[in-house]
Image (tube, grey):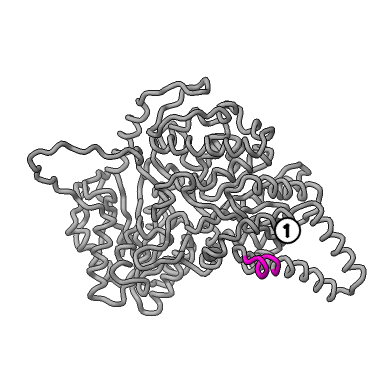
Amino acid sequence: MMALVPVGHASEEAFVLPRPRIVPCITRELQPASLHAAEFTATTHSLAAVGTSVSLALVSAAAVQARRRRSARKANAATVTMGVESKIQKGYFPPRPTPLLDSLGPDGPQGLRSMTVGQLKDVAEEVRWQVLDAVSVSGGHLGAGLGVVDLTVALHAVYDTPRDELCWDVAHQCQPHKVLTGRRDRIYTLRQGGGLSGFAKRSESEYDAFGAGHSSTSISAAVGFQTARDRQGKPGHSVAIIGDGAITGGMAWEAMNHAGGLKSKVLVILNDNGQVSLPTFYNSVETPVGALSETLAGTQAETRGLGIQDNIARIETSNVYQQARQMAKQASKSLFPGVLSNAAAKLDEYSRDFVKTVPFRGSGAGSKGELFEQLGFYYVGPIDGHNMETLVEVLRNIKQQHEDGTLQKPVFLHIKTQKGKGYLPAQNARDKLHAVAPKFNVPKPTLPPGPPKEPKPVRPPLTKVFAESLVREAEVDEKIVAITAAMPGGTGISIFEKRFGPQRTFDVGIAEQHAVTFAAGLAAGGLKPFCAIYSTFLQRGYDQLVHDVALQKLPVRFVLDRAGLVGADGATHGGTFDLSFMACVPNM
């Protein structure tokens, strides 16, 4: 049975198809004119009843048109001349002088390498303001970018970019990187037609070493860069920056397993801000999803010890310490036979964990470090990701020891950051202002008192219509369960969870492959799973869709949100392939 149902996402307004071509689960063809809430509810009811694999695709044409109109208005906005020669559009934050940032000009971050740590701190504050002002015009991701400003400045000050590659995972946090790499004069064009991408994009700048938009790819890319460099005998370094949400994806662990086996001299930086790209704790769920998130989170008492961990990190990445380690290793090999030599090597690892965990509780580094050390990494941290002195010193030490061969293995640097850092409303917000609309900081005008107006009817977004329809079905069918992959709000599953709680709602984190096969297991076990995933992210679970669901004819209901064109988020987030790659699957 073909059951791909295209419906509007942003509203229930009509969208135009060249010809009616999709047969839904209800008994008649969809007309290209419209699909109303009653029909959508009937479709959801039908999905709950049928025993075949189905897919529900949500398309937003009205939203795309609205975004195009907004982009055109922004493109015509007035510009003002700032401290650089190019013209920069004014945003909605109070202007401030940015002398150090202005001094970099369009040539990129080379000027950072001659600055003092004090000057780098000042640059970070100027960059933070620039990101806020630009996003107040463009909208889009905000909190994650604010959280990595200090790290971004330190990375460009220490590493020889663009020769040394920075691979940003997801890259929704790369606005500070773009400000520093010769694109400041275009930063107000973020997410607009003909403007800068909201993510890293190779065709946009030589500083964007690897494009992104989806998660968990950075470590694989960085290992590839470093292996290619070693193979060709070229100097340089490769760095992957990955968040605590993205590292839950299986591909990240596949890459770390490989990197440890290769003894690749790659640096992996875990930007641990206590949230995934969208917070997966919501409603009655108060802790981040998954055992790894809970392990990394620590406690408030542990976080207060970051100052001690900073000092430990400076010591254990110093040349004196590393040389002493190497001498001890060589001595143990010459004095002890194989088994005892291996035990001596473990003693070094355990002693570092002991110092971090027992006398100086810090942030519980020992229990975390063991996990990554067993994969062949040299674990450093956690350190304060907003302490410029520590960041610069530790990064320089790691870079130098990879260059001179003191460290012949990959390094895992664990940093703790605050999402939304430097902007109090973001720091206080539940989602840390993960993403915002244009003019997010502009108070809404107070309308003068007048006669009350009859409110205009507002059609609810179809994501909400779907979620409420699923709740109604689940109230009469206890076998219905819902699954999402770190997108509870965007898919409507948070509405389902609010009604039924975590017992019937499963947020697996950024792990679409697992989500699909987990749904298959639930279906094989007799439940009725609704797997709600963004269209673009289901691409990551395609083999599981074919191998684990379709070939076994398991009744999994796929609900694809953000299908079709998505406008400002660009090509990496377009749901443009779902009908093609799902319609050809047997039993779908």
Task: Say which quarter of the image contains residue 463.
Answer: bottom left
372 or 449, nearer to the observer: 449
Residue visible at 75% across and 48% down in the picture: 230
Element under disc 1: helix
Spot occupied by residue 40 in the image (x, y as percentages of width and height): 22, 59
429 or 107, nearer to the observer: 429
The magenta stretch is 354-361
- Residue 574, compared with residue 529, is above or below; it is above
Q: Report whether 491 appears left or right of 293.
A: left
**Res. 231 in view:** no
Q: To which residue does mark 1 refer?
A: 262
Spot occupied by residue 470 in the image (x, y as percentages of width and height): 26, 66
Q: Amino acid at mark 1?
A: Leu
Residue visible at 65% across and 68% down in the picture: 357
- Residue 130, compared with residue 140, is above or below; it is above
Spot occupied by residue 502 in the image (x, y as percentages of width and height): 37, 71
Q: Report whether 588 appears left or right of 211.
A: left
Question: Number of callouts in the render?
Answer: 1
Residue visible at 47% across and 38% down in the picture: 131
